């Protein structure tokens, strides 16, 4: 008997012809990668193959020649297309046998819904002799754990709502026993109000240095409109050692990035703003034009937000800016709708109508049309208003299409609110382009 | 000389260690699959591999043993990690040579931004002797077309904003010459107000029958909250023949699915609603509670929507429902905020305040808290109001978490507006669970 070996690399295989169309991508591998990484296992290759026994068979044979751990997702369904079980059994040379216990479990699943089991589903009770059956209360197809001369192949059902609990409840514990003593520990820094290249420039010298320490910290930079994330990870045998390292690099990064870092604990920007509103006891009203409801929608996304979101007004036309938010027609005429003066008054109006403590106003030119030399597409003005005064106004020129401008403007509005709540916003700052 | 062969299958390879983390997925392959399918080429396998010459080399060798066309994305950058060029050249046994034209183009790209070319970038001018250089005005790394004994390997840069124009402007034409006479023609039916299983039940007998005709129609069913899509595709040598087949199956599907099919021409629901508003000359005002601004945000997503969206009010609290939308406190007390009566009055109020022609009201229990036996989490009420009367009210109980409930409610609100605009909505219908 081969002694159990510790794995450091694995491969994932997603099976399904639908994954070779332009419409579906293999998202299971992202979940599996996160889970495997946590156990100190690196994913070396990911493959996606159709419902063809030959293709799957040769792929699996190749994979097992490179690594000792292969996770195969999908192809365990009851139809003729679902060939994973048979293909793996044939490859290992293990005969299939019907498992009466699985069969009765599948039957009773159908019976519970008042249905008789279709004949098709009988194939799901076929088990390669020698395989460990991984019971699946989240669906009909059980998973399988096949171990041969130290190499392990794990078969899991394709639907994420089955695959994910199957992994955490059925597979993880088995892998832990065989994993190295190393685990992967992570931290995510979320940054608003700074572009990717700006963050890179400031963060790079720090994370490069930490990538050369022992244990090294691996950093990935991920950017989406209005948000930059630094994903830090470190392999260590103990949480305390990893925590110390991650605390060290985080402190240095926060030092250079300042209060643009809005979260180091996984919280989103609306969650951070919500916590600050709860903490200060302030309630907010939003008046938005070019963002068309997105600012309010993101604030309201957080459970419990009804405690601090009083109202949102989407004042897309000048008419509504006047009638609902009480903006003077003369102000609209003299400054134009996309102006800091109007953003401020929208904030004041949004605050007033519902009796909120803070008002947030957003107005600008999202495009594609409507831009001028003075007010180009992408120019967005923000205002935050409190009792008796305007706290902050700001103008930013964003680049990108309509949707990207609106996403960036939404993120910036929430970040300004955060900064006001932190009491750190200066009275007036005008920034061009982030 | 080998005569050019026509391809029917291809493989894609994505290169980059960042694609083997939990944070990034290979989205290029979806774009490439759509493009290749259009040329009648099926993708047989997709692989993702890290920045390791050995792994990439063996993967490419395997791929070329199976298919005659391989598209490799990424690994063409200027850093030490970028090994695609060298690896492919080594595999084919073609020597690398510096291409002075490419080098000067890269230099001038930097010069335009007032920068000197870093030494690193020199590697991007290395070309395997015999390869066709695919000029890349969208970035620094040129693409390469390597043809050997009828087999073709195409190297493209990884960033989608470079890869996509590179494919359509540099690669597509070359492939057309070698593609079969077959092209893939598609049509997408978009359906609202019916769940996936309901659509499946009605559509399945039809698309199964069409899958057995000549040429066969391939159907994929894709569902997201509040939306079901039927993707139909057919391989044919002529657009007219394909169009006839697609028209036939579309007509049969629309027959059974009725006006739940809101689009067969690629338009989104807000685009369809926007076109109907423009056509009828009606302008709309929105009052929303549990959807928190999403209904307005989706309407405003469409360029030109300022012509027909007058205003949106997010009336999250009863206070705002009273002060801004003019709901009677007695109505809120007797029916509760999540009721058809309040949804109707919200619609009327949203219509009134901006002088819109149609008002749309949404109120309900998005969860996770706030549900009761009578008004469980997921119950959402809708109202559409016109001059002098309430046109429609409806109550739906959605399942899923907070975000999913809100997405479904948003889609349903837009669909009700569509149905009213089509003049097809009955006066009052109450449906439980879609």
Image: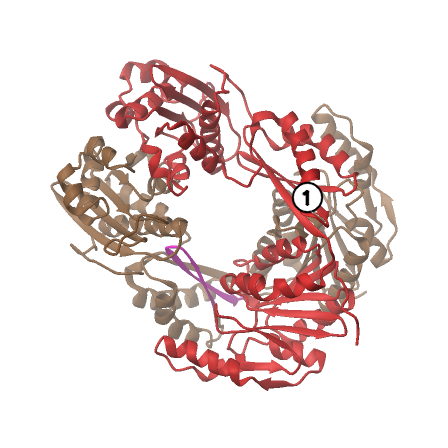
Chain colours: A brown, B red
Query: x%, y% of residue A56?
Result: 77, 56
Q: Which residues are magenta?
A: A219-237
Query: x%, y% of residue B289?
Result: 36, 29
**Along the line of sight, the residue nearer the viewer: B87 or A179:** B87
Residue sitting at 77 percent across and 40 percent down? Answer: A78
* Residue pointed to by mark 1: B240
Per the image, is A93 magenta?
A: no
Asked if residue B209 lies left or right of residue B176, the reply is right
Residue B403, above or below B162: above
Picture quadrant where residue B293 is located: top left
Asked if residue B305 lies left or right of residue A17, the reply is left
Residue sitting at 60 percent across and 86 percent down? Answer: B97
Please identify the dominant SS of the magenta region: strand
SS of the residue at dot 1? helix
Q: Quadrant of the C terminus of chain A?
A: bottom left
Picture quadrant where residue A208 is located: bottom left
Q: Chain of mark 1?
A: B
Question: Circle 1: is it few (<14), some (14-19), or many (20+) Cα within 10 Å?
Answer: few
Residue sitting at 27 percent across and 56 percent down? Answer: A396
Asked if residue A241 lies left or right of residue B239, the reply is left
Query: Can residue A7 be seen at all in this image of the molecule?
Result: no
Per the image, is A228 magenta?
A: yes
Asked if residue B145 lies left or right of residue A419, the reply is right
Q: Quadrant of the N terminus of chain A?
A: bottom right
Residue sitting at 29 percent across and 25 percent down? Answer: B321
Query: x%, y% of residue B15?
Result: 60, 68
Picture quadrant where residue A225 is located: bottom left
């Amino acid at each position: 008997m081969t002694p159990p070996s510790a794995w450091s690399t694995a491969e994932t295989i997603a099976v399904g012809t639908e994954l070779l169309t332009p419409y579906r991508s293999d998202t299971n591998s992202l979940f599996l990668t996160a889970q495997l990484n946590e156990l100190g296992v690196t994913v070396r290759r990911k493959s996606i193959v159709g419902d063809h026994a030959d293709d799957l068979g040769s792929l699996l044979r190749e994979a097992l020649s490179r690594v000792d751990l292969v996770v195969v997702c999908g192809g365990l369904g009851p139809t003729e297309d679902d060939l994973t079980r048979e293909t793996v059994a044939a490859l290992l040379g293990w005969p299939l046998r019907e498992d009466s216990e699985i069969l009765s479990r599948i039957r009773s699943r159908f019976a519970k819904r008042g249905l008789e089991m279709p004949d098709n589903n009988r194939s799901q009770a076929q088990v390669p002799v020698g395989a460990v059956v991984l019971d699946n209360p989240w669906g009909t197809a059980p998973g399988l754990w096949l171990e041969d001369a130290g190499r392990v192949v794990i078969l899991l059902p394709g639907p994420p709502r089955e695959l994910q609990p199957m992994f955490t409840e059925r597979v993880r514990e088995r892998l832990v026993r065989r994993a190295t003593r190393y685990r992967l520990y992570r931290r995510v820094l979320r940054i608003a109000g700074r572009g990717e290249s700006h963050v890179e420039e400031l963060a790079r010298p720090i994370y490069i240095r930490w990538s050369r320490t022992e244990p090294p910290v691996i950093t990935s930079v991920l950017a989406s409109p209005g948000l930059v994330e630094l994903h830090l990870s470190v392999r260590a045998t103990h949480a305390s050692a990893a925590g110390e390292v991650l605390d060290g690099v985080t402190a240095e990064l926060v030092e250079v990035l300042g209060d643009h870092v809005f979260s180091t604990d996984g919280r989103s920007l609306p969650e951070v703003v919500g916590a600050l509103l709860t903490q200060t006891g302030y309630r907010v009203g939003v008046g938005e034009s070019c963002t068309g409801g997105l600012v309010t929608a993101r604030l309201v996304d957080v459970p419990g937000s009804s405690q601090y979101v009083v109202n949102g007004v989407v004042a897309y036309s000048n008419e509504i800016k006047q009638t609902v938010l009480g903006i003077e027609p003369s102000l609209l005429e003299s400054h134009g709708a996309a102006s800091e003066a109007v953003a401020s008054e929208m904030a004041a109006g949004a605050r007033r109508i519902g009796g909120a403590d803070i008002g947030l106003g957003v107005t600008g030119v999202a495009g594609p049309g409507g831009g001028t030399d003075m007010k180009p597409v992408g120019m967005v003005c923000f205002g935050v208003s409190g009792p008796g005064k305007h706290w902050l106004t700001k103008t930013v020129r964003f680049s990108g299409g309509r949707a990207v401008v609106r996403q960036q403007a939404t993120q910036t509005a929430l970040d300004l609110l955060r900064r006001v709540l932190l009491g750190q916003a200066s009275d007036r700052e005008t920034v061009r382009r982030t």
